[in-house]
Image (cartoon, rainbow, N blue to C red):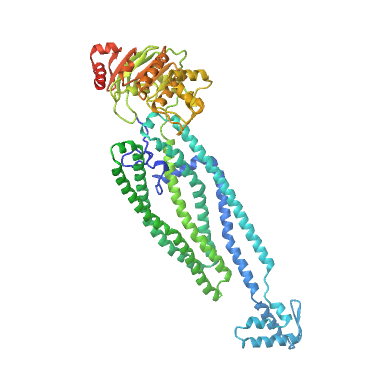
Amino acid sequence: MGQKEYNTGQEKGRQAGPMGGPHGPHGPRSGEKAKDLVGTWKKLFGYCRKYMLVFVIAMFCAAIGTVLTLIGPDKLSEMTDTITEGIAPDTEMLQRIMEAIHGNPVPFTDIEIDGVTITGEDQAEMMAVIAGMDKADGEGAMALEQLPDSVYGLIKPSIDMDRIFQIGFVLIAFYVISYILSAVQGWIMATVTQRVSQEMRSDISRKINRLPMWFYNRTTTGDVLSRVTNDVDTIGQSLNQSIRSLISSAILFFGSLAMMLLTDGWMTLTAVAASLLGFVFMFLIMGRSQKYFTRQQKHLGEMNGHIEEIYAGHTVVKAYNGEEEAWKTFDQMNGNLCESGFKAQCLSGLMMPIMIFIGNLGYVAVCVAGGALALDGRISFGVIVAFMMYVRYFTQPLSQIAQAVQSLQSAGAAGERVFEFLEAEEMEDESGKTGMLENVKGDVEFEHVRFGYEDSDRIIIHDFSAKAKAGQKIAIVGPTGAGKTTMVNLLMRFHEIQGGKIRIDGIPTDQMTREAVHGQFCMVLQDTWLFEGTVRENLVYNHENVSDEKIEEACRAVGLHHFIRTLPHGYDTILNDQVNLSQGQKQQLTIARAMIADKPMLILDEATSSVDTRTEQLIQAAMDKLMENRTSFVIAHRLSTIKNADLILVMKDGDIIESGSHEELLNQGGFYADLYNSQFDQAS
């Protein structure tokens, strides 16, 4: 059929998770990679293209905020040097005074420096104090305080507070602006990613309604649910956090490296060498722990699948005394998970201590090397302070980048699954179809219908031809796998036929839109479907302005009115886990729903299979009344329920092998007669 290949959790060689999909209810497993990471991210950015300008603004805010953060240590170094210079006496001024004294033509006469007059007596006293400084080892600072006031006032320690305040205000401004930009960037990214997630979920929801029925025959409900919820959430979180973290961390890493190189080369070499030594240990541990994380996820999936399987079949397990065997299997799986989880968590738990070790090692190396260079006079104390901050800025981003890359890989895997779903082949566009049905009588004709499922070369319906006149009750019977349900699905256009025609009142169904065809039928299936809502809402599903009288009449007809009146709030009782309905009562509700819909034609697929005999008789009488003047197609395994059918079609292996009324088929003594008699033989 040329259908596009679509990968689901049921592929050979892939283990399905507890929800049926490859990942269970949690989407892609940790560490799973996309097959085409670059291509998937191109699609993601293409999907977000209308927000691209906002993305760029957010990234610009993150970049500027990070750059301002990087400038901080340089300004802090400048402040530290200013304070350091202010703490020590002004030796340069002392040198100027000494030169002025020695260069004075007349010894010990008054001299003036920077507007301060130093008398001869002060000069003599100063020379005496300086001469005594060499004798008093370690008392230099105290000796300087003994200098005359005129001299000491010029050389005494003095911190330039104006300069300190100026640098402080600049630092505060930088950090405040950096915070504001980070907050703006976070707000933008949170807003955009939620909008993108919202649109992606909406697109998936619309896509669900445009996909052909054969798609859902090959895809589990859990797999689709995982794409709508967990995969989209993974993409949103990655867009919000990983991209921002990746950009900020990259700028912080390379920016700090550049600032260190500009400040001092030897200190940069020391800091980088110490940090890289620690990262070697970290990557060695990461390499060993990854396989244990993989095993952990595998064992977790196995155990979850086992638990769900045992829980779903709990009654069967109890009936066959299989509790001990189930417990042994669970105990083995639990032990495997415990072992792999212990190893994974132990190795993973070493990461944070190693990061702390890397940071501390960098601090120690910077302090030791910086102290040696400072004693040599090659760097100032402020450079050491700046490098202590740069070491943190250099080591911290590496772990953030590693986490961001891993998150991007998970998002890539999630994005691949989402786009795989969004790009799946849809049903053909029917906007150009003009076939309409007005004043429907209900004549239905199958003309040489041929059909095989889209993903298979096997033909299910070979050459099906039949005519149903308006108002007739048509029963379709046959063994399991004969093609009975397939025929009504083709009538409803849930699948497209490969040959022949199906006509309603002479108009081929392929000339009408699917909605137009669906609007002519109401269906009651063997599998009941009720949603969480009131009884009334379930009964009038997708119909408006239905009177209470019509609702109660339908429920009386199927024998359900009395039961509904006994519910806490009657027809306004909400159907949920607290309201226990039997399978038969659920079936009665769906039959009443079909009666309320009041469509021209009716399809019943084993509609009374879940009710008791007395209720079946009551419902059958109601259905007979409902089917008056309506074309009805009834699929039944209990042949006693279709004795009054106007036409019985006996199917086997996709073809009609017999047709006629109940009496006619019994008189023929063929396949139908054998099938009918075998049921009574079994009953006896």
Vertical placement of residue 150 versus 459, above or below: below
- 447 relative to 233 in the view: left or right: left
Can residue 447 be seen here? no
Residue found at the far front of this picture: 566
- Where does the N terminus fall, quadrant-wise? top left
Vertical side of 588 occupied by 247: above or below:
below
Q: Quadrant of the C terminus?
A: top left
Q: Position of residue 580 (x, y in %)?
A: 43, 31
Up/down of 124 relative to 440, above or below: below
Residue 641 quadrant:
top left
Q: Where's residue 189, x and y in %?
A: 55, 46
Residue 321: image x %, image y %?
A: 28, 39
Q: Residue shown at 62%/83% (left/top)?
A: 139
Find residue 427 and report its horizontal and vertical position in percent: 42, 28
Q: Please tell me which residue lies in front, 583 or 295.
A: 583
In this image, 670 relative to 227: left or right?
A: left
At 58% from the left edge and 51% from the top edge, which residue is drawn? 182
Quarter holding residue 468: top left
Judged left or right of residue 370, residue 292 is: left
| 630 over 424 or under it: above or below | above
Task: Count every numbered label the image shows and give the total.
Answer: 0
Give the residue displayed 65% in from the left and 63% down from the top.
167
